[in-house]
Amino acid sequence: MHLPISTTAGTFIAHYTTHGLARLDFPDDRRPPVPQSKSSVEPSTQIRRWHDLTTRALQATLAGRSPRELPPLDLSVGTEFQREVWQVLLQIAVGQTQSYGEVAAKIGRPKALRAVGGACGANPIPVLVPCHRVLAANHRIGGFSSGLDWKRKLLAIERIPTNS
DNA sequence: TAACATTCCGCGC
DNA sequence: GCGCGGAATGTTA
């Protein structure tokens, strides 16, 4: 089940499973016509409730505010290592940052800092799972698989300074 | 096995 | 200070 979310930054697409929100896609200019009529199945009341939470959480974050409540996240995709990393990311508050090394240390593998980058890139729920708040050491911007422009934009929304 | 969203250190400018 | 090269490093497909 996937549903659109209109925001000031464009139309995101949220994907749901029976366990919760499984994926969030950035707006894609090559796909402006939202598959509205294509969604043949009506969302269940549960998914509508989740979608409502997702919408508010996403809009809050894009406005630089901390979401009051998140929908249940289906992180069953992904390896155990990746889920550990994503859990750490969820605890980074709005406007705060961590380095890849700090995240690695938090999950008890201080030397896996390189792999943390990989887990961030595999994050299926950007923005809500704040992969953009992970910077390289000494606050350099590092990378971002969905495009550095998105990372810069998200950091700017939260007034996070970087060295670059 | 090869690819990384890293980090650190040493060098030359 | 900056850029560059190279090494160590864990996880993934």
Image (cartoon, coloured by chain):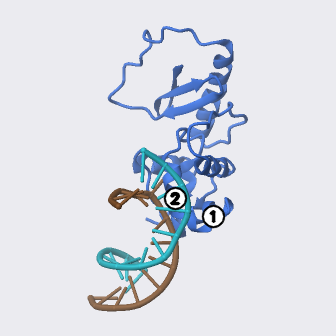
Chain colours: A blue, B brown, C cyan
- Compare residues A47 and A84 and report the one nearer the observer: A84
Does A54 sit above or below residue C4?
above
Which label number is shown at residue A115?
Answer: 2
The quadrant in which residue A128 appears is: top right
Residue A97 appearing in the image:
yes
- Compare residues A38 and A151 and report the one nearer the observer: A38
- Residue sitting at 52 percent across and 50 percent down? A120
Q: Is residue B2 left or right of A51 when viewed as pictured? A: left
Q: Are marks 2 and 1 in contact (CB under 8 Å)?
A: yes
Which quadrant of the figure contains the N terminus of chain A? top right
Q: Residue A159: image x %, image y %?
A: 57, 53
Q: Is residue A61 left or right of A145 when viewed as pictured? A: right
Q: Secondary structure at mark 2?
A: helix
**Type of residue at label 2?**
Ala
Which quadrant of the figure contains the C terminus of chain A? bottom left
Q: Residue C8: image x %, image y %?
A: 48, 76
Q: Residues within 10 Å of mark 1 (few under 14, many from 20)?
A: some
- Residue sitting at 61 percent across and 52 percent down? A85
Q: Residue A94: image x %, image y %?
A: 65, 49
Q: Which residue is mark 1?
A: A109
Which of the marked residues, 2 or 1, is nearer the chain's N terminus? 1
- Residue sitting at 56 percent across and 42 percent down? A78
Q: Is residue A137 left or right of C7 when viewed as pictured? A: right
Which label number is shown at residue A156?
Answer: none
Q: Residues within 10 Å of mark 2 (few under 14, many from 20)?
A: some
Q: Disc 2 to disc 1, how far (Cα)?
A: 10 Å
